[in-house]
Image: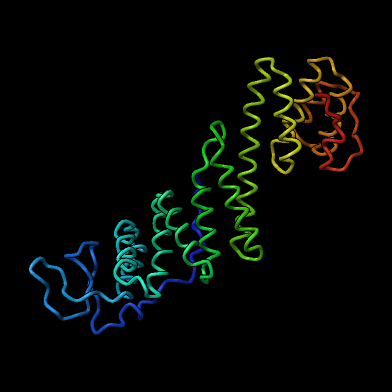
């Protein structure tokens, strides 16, 4: 699941005017001590290192410039330098968060999550704490694997996204997290379907029914439910449980009357199928599970 969305950047970036608050315009920083920013006229030492420390706002502004230029490694070094050389400044706190965002942008999700965990632990009352939780959730979400592989990462991402919704329900971050929760749940349902189909092909019908049932019961808002109901109908017919097959087909017809899976199901069961009268969502009661 790799369709990266640009996260909502918090209001952290300094303006160009702030970047130039020193006595002269800082030159570009190349991420090394030799190329370090300095507004001071103090001569450089023998190794080329500026004698006077750079102002934290200059380092931070250079990190932002490098970030905009997509020079992510250099940007991270600039933000890290702010935190290392000016740890008690307000710039250092913002630099921690921007370093994490930059790591996210360069697909270094483990590093981004580590930096965000530290930020959340050290600055729980920061004005951008909601963004920190959101960015951590995005870093987990971007690591979701193909639906045919182990889905532990999907479950971790779901928990992180739900954390955003629970803590900051009225924010734009929560709104986006809810959308991604739906996509992640669809991913989990896809995994259940993959396993269930395998069991069905192997003739392990009880195991297959358990997986299909989970999709129907726990992932009712996903687009995998119609197929799950169809597959359940197939299995019931294979086992000679025609009444259960009809009830399952009726639920499918009531909730998804125009779905292609219902057309296939109707062809299997025939004229004995009629809508069950149950409202959408009441799958368990309507189907009448037999295993």
Say whether residue 217 is left or right of residue 23. Answer: right
| Quadrant location, the C terminus | top right
Say whether residue 3 is left or right of residue 108. Answer: right
Please give the name of the residue rendered at 86% of the width and 22% of the height, measured from the top-left corner.
270
Nearer to us in this view, 32 or 88: 88
> Residue 166: percent from the left, percent from the top?
65, 58
> Residue 246: percent from the left, percent from the top?
87, 25
Quadrant assignment, res 229: top right
Q: How many marks?
A: 0
Residue 233 vs 169, above or below: the answer is above
Residue 123 vs 135, above or below: the answer is below
Quadrant assignment, res 201: top right
> Residue 133: percent from the left, percent from the top?
54, 59
Please give the name of the residue rendered at 34% of the width and 65% of the height, measured from the top-left corner.
79
Please give the name of the residue rendered at 24% of the width and 62% of the height, measured from the top-left corner.
31
Nearer to us in this view, 179 or 159: 159
Say whether residue 77 is left or right of residue 100. Answer: left
Nearer to us in this view, 141 or 269: 141
Please give the name of the residue rendered at 53% of the width and 32% of the height, measured from the top-left corner.
149
Looking at the image, what colour scheme do you see? rainbow
> Residue 94: percent from the left, percent from the top?
42, 69
């Amino acid at each position: 699941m790799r369709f990266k969305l640009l996260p909502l950047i918090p209001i952290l970036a300094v303006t160009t005017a702030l970047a130039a608050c020193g006595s002269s315009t800082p030159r570009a920083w190349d991420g090394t001590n030799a190329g370090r920013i300095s507004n001071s006229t103090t001569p450089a030492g023998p190794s080329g290192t500026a004698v006077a420390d750079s102002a934290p706002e200059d380092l931070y502004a250079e990190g932002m410039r490098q970030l905009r230029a997509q020079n992510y490694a250099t940007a991270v070094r600039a933000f890290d330098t702010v935190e290392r050389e000016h740890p008690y400044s307000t710039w250092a706190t913002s630099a921690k968060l921007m370093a994490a965002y930059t790591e996210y942008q360069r697909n270094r999700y483990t590093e981004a999550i580590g930096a965000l965990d530290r930020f959340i632990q050290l600055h729980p009352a920061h004005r951008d704490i909601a963004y920190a939780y959101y960015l951590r959730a995005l870093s987990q979400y971007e690591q979701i694997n193909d639906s045919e592989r182990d889905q532990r990462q999907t479950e971790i991402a779901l928990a992180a996204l739900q954390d955003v919704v629970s803590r900051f329900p009225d924010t734009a971050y929560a709104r986006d997290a809810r959308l991604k929760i739906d996509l992640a749940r669809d991913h989990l349902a896809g995994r259940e379907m993959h396993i269930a189909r395998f069991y069905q092909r192997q003739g392990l019908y009880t195991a297959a029914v358990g997986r299909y049932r989970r999709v129907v019961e726990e992932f009712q808002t996903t687009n995998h439910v119609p197929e799950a109901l169809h597959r359940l109908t197939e299995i019931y017919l294979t086992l000679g449980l025609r009444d259960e097959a009809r009830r399952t087909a009726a639920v499918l017809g009531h909730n998804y009357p125009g779905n292609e899976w219902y057309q296939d199901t109707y062809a299997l069961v025939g004229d004995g199928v009629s809508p069950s009268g149950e409202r959408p969502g009441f799958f368990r009661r309507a189907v009448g599970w037999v295993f």
